[in-house]
Amino acid sequence: MPLSSTIESSLFLDHHSPNPIPDSVKMNGFKSLGIAVSIVLFFTQKPQIIKFILPLIPFIYFFTSNNDYTVPWTDLRQAAVFICGIIFIPTVRTLAPQLKKVIWHESEAIVEVYGLEHGRLNIDLPPKSMWMNMGYWKDTNDFPTACRALLIKVLETADVMRRTPGKDESTALELIDLGFGCGDQTEYLTRQVEGSSGTLYHADEWARTTSSQQKFPLFRKYTGITLSKTQFKYAEARLNTFQHLNQGDLATDHISDRVQIFCGDAARPDAWPQALLTAVQTNSERTTRWVLALDTFYHFSPSRWAVIAHAYEKLDASVMAFDLVLAEDVTLFQKALLFLVCVLSGSPYGNFVTVDQYRKKLQEAGYRAENIAMEDISEHVFTPLTGFLDRRERDLDAIGVGFGGLKAAKWLFGWWARTRIVRGVIVVARR
């Protein structure tokens, strides 16, 4: 028998054989083939395979049809059955939980109509806060509080929040914030005020405790940069609302003309727009300038070092950050897995360096060794953050809200907590 006839018979596409295979057998064959493909997709978890399988259908047909390029109705049905076979297992997998309830727990299924899904209607929207960093969880289990605590921890480590209060321009502070998220840290930083006694207040706290003493902003000028257009628009709207609601408040008299935010790539200062370059310039030699990178440096592409060098050479600024470093005793397999994580998350693998390598890079940028401080706070970051994400996932699942991509983040932070191969550190490099 010719090879083409053999293939025809094996694929149930023999239209001209004197003993044609019944259509029912062909249908079962195509369904079985489809289910086989479905099983492969299920166990390999690689749905992209289907992109290589589906184009084979017309090829198989034309190759085995003796150049008869008509498409009989029977063959269309066979193709349809094949596709149904492919989606069989995913469909069963999706419907199985609900079918189980209906068949085995019918009463429970009826009760679920009055379950917890209405919890979605009780979630505050828009959210009261949109903080996003890993947090400093030493004294809290609340996410926004932990995020704010991480910011405060960085500021305190740099002695920015414990300095002797200034009454003139000689101690004025300017801040360049690289990656301000959705504006929560912008709002927090621009509403920090000092009293004449040296006590630091948030503007709301000041309004509750004192009204007669002189007060002035902690930062004379704030410039924020973010790469995300979506977050920039969100933060811009919040900042405009914040300024509108606080018109006439002494704590915010200094904000409207001294707070600017920009959408741009903080990692590439050579590509900053002119408006941003103008905003970060200063006309006073008596100004102390800081660059802040709160949980952002390790995302910078191609690396963080260009903007750190720019901070030293062009901005005459000190640097404070919460950043990630690589432990010293990391195995080759762990490095390979971390490399894969970086590829999937879009974070440059080269940003994960050891503490010693980090210090060396800071010195190469110009910062003196005695002016560099690094503090490991991992124990108050990864483990409690993983615990919070686990609790939040269960709470959301109870009301029928998915956790999305945060599941991968929970696994990642848990891995770092268990293996200690990545450390969370506060970095301070003084000019």
Image: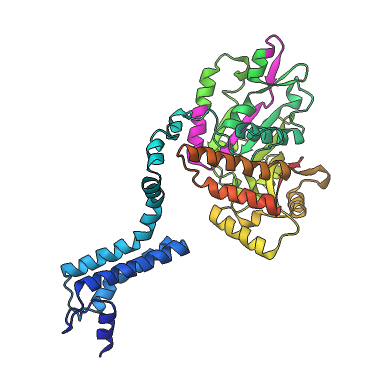
Q: Residue furthest top?
A: 212
Of residues 243 and 174, the one drawn nearer to the viewer in this rendering: 243
Q: Residue at x 16, y 72 (%)?
A: 70
Q: Residue at x 16, y 70 (%)?
A: 72
Rendered location of residue 216, percent (x, y): 68, 19
Say above or below: 41 vs 296. Answer: below
Where the C terminus falls, by quadrant? top right
Rendered location of residue 415, percent (x, y): 64, 52
Residue 322: quadrant of the picture: top right
Rendered location of residue 184, percent (x, y): 58, 31
Q: How many marks?
A: 0
Residue 177 on the magenta segment: no
Say above or below: 399 vs 205. Answer: below
Q: Which residues are magenta?
A: 209-238
Q: Residue at x 70, y 36 (%)?
A: 290
Q: Report the side of 78 relative to 301 (left or right).
A: left
Of residues 230 and 165, the one drawn nearer to the viewer in this rendering: 230
Q: Residue at x 26, y 64 (%)?
A: 81
Rendered location of residue 405, percent (x, y): 51, 47
Residue 348 seen from this side: yes
Of residues 398 and 418, the one drawn nearer to the viewer in this rendering: 398
Q: Residue furthest bottom?
A: 1
Say above or below: 90 vs 78. Answer: above
Say above or below: 346 vs 425. Answer: below
Residue 300 seen from this side: no
- How has the structure been colored for display? rainbow
